[in-house]
Image (cartoon, rainbow, N blue to C red):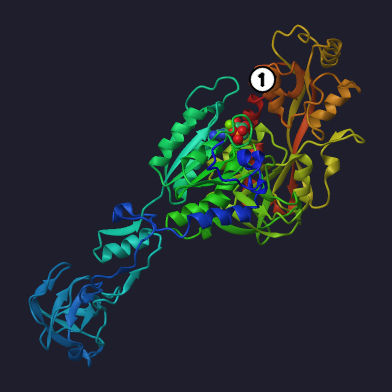
Amino acid sequence: MGSGMTMIPRSQIPSAFEQEQFLKILSREEALARFEALLFPRTIPTEMRKLADALGAALAEDVTAPIDVPPFDRSNVDGFAVRSADIVAAGEGKPVRLALNGETIHCGTAPALQVAAGTATAIATGGPLPRGADAVVMVEHTQPAGSDAIEVRRATSPGQFVSYAGSDIARGEALLRAGTIIGSREIGMLAACGIAEVSVARKPVVAVISTGDELVQPGQPLAPAEIYDTNGAIVTAAIDENGGEAVFHGAVPDDEAMLEAAMRRALAGADMLVLSGGTSKGAGDLSHRIIGRLGQPGVIAHGVALKPGKPLCLAVCDGKPVVILPGFPTSAMFTFHDMIVPVLRRMAGLPPRSDAKVSATVPVRIASELGRTEFVMVSLVEGQDRLIAYPTGKGSGAITSFAQADGFLRIDALADQMPAGTEAEVTLFTPHVRVPDLVIVGSHCTGLDLVTAELAHAGLTVRSIAVGSLGGLAAAKRGECDLAPIHLFDDRSETYNTPYLVEGLELVPGWRRMQGIVFREGDKRFEGLGAKDAVAAALADPACIMVNRNQGAGTRILIDRLLGGARPEGYWNQPRSHNAVAAAVVQHRADWGMTIAPVAHAAGLGFIPLAEEHYDFVLVTARKDRPAVQAFLDALGSDDARAALERAGFRPA
Ligand code: AMP
Ligand code: MG
């Protein structure tokens, strides 16, 4: 050991744990405060932009009007430039005759002659007022009097139909303030003053890298166990939407040397680097280690008390923000919109995005984990007199919930729930609320798309929120949707759906879906058998694995009845959708399961029919007269929809 070594008290040495993994979880607020303190204030680089390219940019400096607009006193009408004093006495019975000067002032023509007392000069809208004139008489209020004179039959006051120089924009006036976002209106004002280019905040260049061995770019074929790179596309677009200039560097495998090279290359040409994936502290957790070598001070938060989004990593490398978003696309989006967009906008010289927030009422209680800021995806629908934010798509991996979601709300770390009726602030993914014409909340079925397709073609927007039959029924009872598709079997009456109706709700028959057992074509254990025998054959073979359904699913009731208390291998694999059952069998993770006929056929599986399920619509009577509801009912009964349903394997009621 060298004698020059400085000894550090043991208590100041970070444990290997902290040093390596940065497991000290920060609150959302603490993480943001540290991140922003290292990044701001900062000088926003500016650049000159031609007007045509300035749309959406933030003005870097105040702009002062260099000229008067209009630049001269201008006529607002087609008529005659006059001296108002000449015609003060004019009236219906007392026409005043004015001699015409020998010119006509068109737009863009400078007048040559003076308007002397007792004369007038023909002038077009936009023409400059000639010397001597102080008002314009509309052509409609005059009559020709021979070839070189007019008669005026009404008096006029000075300034009549004249726009004075500088009345629109006065030279020297502050035209636009720094920080203004340039829209078409601002471009118009600048153009009117003859300004061809402006100094704007330079868009921050943001490099985007996706990480993961499993990632494939859209357009390429997908091998087993691979998935498409969603974050790359979505983060790139969201950066452009928020004032940045995204440069996508593709997906890099979980390889330290390759990733480091890619990160260095990306950061060198950018003001900011956004990665996603590789943060869940597994073996492939490389990026945060690399960041430590990219610049000072490096990682400042790795692990933030967010749900979902805990693996978020924030870093600053020599003044440039470096962010690693969680891998799951929805987690990546929550954290990006909530914590990164504000930073990006500040770097872009843009104000916080006020149009990206709306306030809406939460119709149901949302439970939340104490100690973590929770993000909840919501769908906005129109209530009686306010917006309603419907929580959708639980689970951080659910990209599909994007399709239904308009944005998300945030539940504070110190709250263990958001009570029903709370007025919450919703952050929109894309700023503009599209409240749908028709809201369908309940059990999802692929047949539904076949019916709503007609509405979409008619220009109506349909929002379908999949919350299961019971969730839909509850929403209908609260009057928060137009229709709730359900398939609920009532054991006592042995009928579907009707027994679940209450006052204010009615049932519209939908269609029947054949439920049955699926197996891979050619599996001798099942071929040619009926449902009961097929299940008996499956139970007789210990190597045979089933795939079940979740508790509460109509299909699950049928499965349990068939099994009669047996719990074969695979029973605890309980996916939540018809399609997952088919996928498990196709991919040999299971040998049999129960799903609906259309899904079985689409997946190319063998199918043993068992029982027909009734998929009907609970209609909220109070909303029956809404045009979109009527359009839906028409579509449901139409020959086209019925034919499409039949083709897909459903039986219209
Ligand atoms: P990771 O943080 O890399 O462990 O990723 C967590 C989850 O997100 C895994 O299921 C990944 O496959 C998934 N994931 C990571 N990056 C992406 C991406 N760019 N697009 C879609 N899914 C991703
Ligand atoms: Mg990964």
Vertical position of residue 64 compared to residue 499: above or below: below
Residue in view at x 89 percent, y 33 percent: 494
What residue occupies the far front of the structure in this picture? 3
Residues 213 and 109: in front is 213
Q: Is mark 1 within 8 Å of ligand 1?
A: no
Residue in view at x 22 percent, y 70 percent: 126
Q: How many marks?
A: 1
What residue occupies the far bottom of the structure in this picture? 89
Q: Quadrant for the N terminus, please.
A: top right
Rendering coords of residue 288 (x, y %): 55, 38
Q: Quadrant for the C terminus, please.
A: top right
Rendering coords of residue 397 (x, y %): 64, 36
What residue occupies the far top of the structure in this picture? 524
Crowding near the residue tagged with mark 1, few <14, some 14–19, many ≥20 C-alpha atoms within 10 Å:
some
Residue holding disc 1: 601
Rendering coords of residue 80 (x, y %): 18, 78
Vertical position of residue 369 compared to residue 78: above or below: above
Residue 403 in sight in this render: no
Residue 26 in sight in this render: yes
| Residue type marked 1 | His
Rendering coords of residue 517 (x, y %): 77, 19
Residue in view at x 86 percent, y 34 percent: 495
Q: Quadrant of ligand 1?
A: top right
Residues 11 and 507: in front is 11
In the rendered image, which quarter is residue 421 located in?
Answer: bottom right
Report helix, strand or loop for mark 1: helix
Vertical position of residue 141 compared to residue 626: above or below: below
Q: Is residue 254 left or right of residue 198?
A: right
